[in-house]
Image (spheres, rainbow, N blue to C red):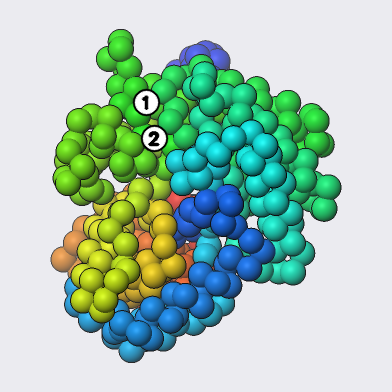
Amino acid sequence: MTLDPRVADRLDTLLAADDVTRPGVAVARQPVHTVYVPADRFTAATVGEWGASALAALDAHGPLPTAGGEADDVVDALVRAKLATEPIEDLRIDFEDGYGSPGDGTEDTDARAAATALARAVADGSAPRHTGIRMKSLESPDRRRGIRTLDLFLETVLAAGPLPGGFRVTLPKVTTVRQVEAMVELCAALDDEYGLPTLNFELQVETPQAILGPDGTVPLARMIHCCAGRCAGLHFGTYDYSASVGIAAAHQSLEHPAADYAKAVMQVAAAGTGTPVCDGSTNILPVGDGQQVRAAWALHARLVRRSLERGFYQGWDLHPAQLPTRFAATFGFYRSGLPAAAGRLRAYRQRSSLGVLDEPATAKALARFLHRAVDCGAAELGEVSALAGVTPAELGDLAAGVGSS
């Protein structure tokens, strides 16, 4: 080797700024959905009530569809067990569009009541794995109200005990990088005020200004990188975004091309940062007679499957009767893909061929698929490890990109 080693030293110096830690918040297990509940309707019993309502809907109107047909007995059993034990993985107490603007006195009261209810749910063990609130935006008309609600909520929760693990704040209607910088400053001030380790937040992508700036750049990419490590996710707002770009109400949907474009930008902006992305919701609710419920279920199951196939492993649910199809479509997606993914990973590890020449990046994607199947409850770790011919530890390493080359 004859190259002067000082060349490598200079390159280290030149690229030092690029060798920084990823800007996103590490998430050990991404939830499959986020449930939004208006703040004035949230109680300590909400999670159990949603689970019971979902099971009642399943009993009344089943069997469940998946995106590819009727759910089999295995998926049905998994769904019922999930609804009985963990019907909500991620809960957002909503002080924004789903709540409205009832006046300062009412919102103050509701903020304290919702915080007390969350603290009670945490104490009795019924709170979901992830929780948080959606505050009002930092646009001028709502800014001070949003700050006050967040402050009151935290003050009340923390009076009863520590902030729940996995707690985050959703910042809606983000339009500028400066708003994100302001949110970082607000969270830092709340950390100092209440002695918090780090208050994290999600960015709700529901304005065209977040996707394309006046200078032709993508502000969303800069938003992630100016979050100072606090960005816990990007959530797509289906209907605000669709309306903002002029889509008629009858055609607003998760699968409209305008929505797909925005979500593709979200994915690219978040790629490599460790920031999870989350699809939006459908406003076609499974309510009414049996025919109406089953039609809404078929639509929801298809949309959930479509999102999963496009790399969105999380979405919004707005009604208890959407939970059965959320879990059925999710479990069906992973179980139907499990044999092929495990077989390809086994072949890759053994340097054999199944007619597909997989790259290290694809091996990582295969391992992450299997890991997500276990995380969401679609399969057992032992089942997946045996099919793929790897130990649980090896599967975790491969999903993290360790040892896949």
Residue 264 visible in the snapshot: no
Q: Of the residues shown, which amino acid type is indicated by label 1?
A: Ala
User: In the rendered view, would you say 63 is above or below 183?
Assistant: below
* Residue at the spot 32% in from the left edge and 62% down from the top edge: 285
Whether pointer 1 and pointer 2 mark residues with C-beta atoms closer than 8 Å, the reply is yes
Kind of element beneath mark 1: helix
Q: Would residue 116 appear left or right of 283 to someone viewing this image?
A: right
Question: Residue farthest to the bottom?
Answer: 73
Q: Position of residue 100 (x, y in %)?
A: 49, 40
Q: Would residue 397 appear left or right of 358 to someone viewing this image?
A: right
Q: Nearer the viewer, residue 127 or 243?
A: 243
* Residue at the spot 67% in from the left edge and 37% down from the top edge: 105
* Residue at the spot 66% in from the left edge and 52% down from the top edge: 114
Q: Position of residue 11 (x, y in %)?
A: 49, 17
Q: Of the residues shown, which amino acid type is indicated by label 2?
A: Val
User: In the rendered view, would you say 316 is above or below 324?
Assistant: above
Q: Which residue is mark 2?
A: 205
Q: Nearer the viewer, residue 101 or 252?
A: 101
Image quarter where the N terminus lies is top left
Q: Residues within 10 Å of mark 1 (few under 14, many from 20)?
A: many
Kind of element beneath mark 2: strand
Q: Would residue 123 appear left or right of 24 to someone viewing this image?
A: right
Q: Which residue is mark 1?
A: 210
Question: Residue farthest to the top?
Answer: 215
User: In the rendered view, would you say 121 is above or below 272?
Assistant: below
* Quadrant housing residue 74: bottom left
User: In the rendered view, would you say 151 is above or below 130?
Assistant: above
Count of numbered labels shown in the rendering: 2
Measure the alpha-carbon separation of dots 1 and 2. Answer: 7 Å
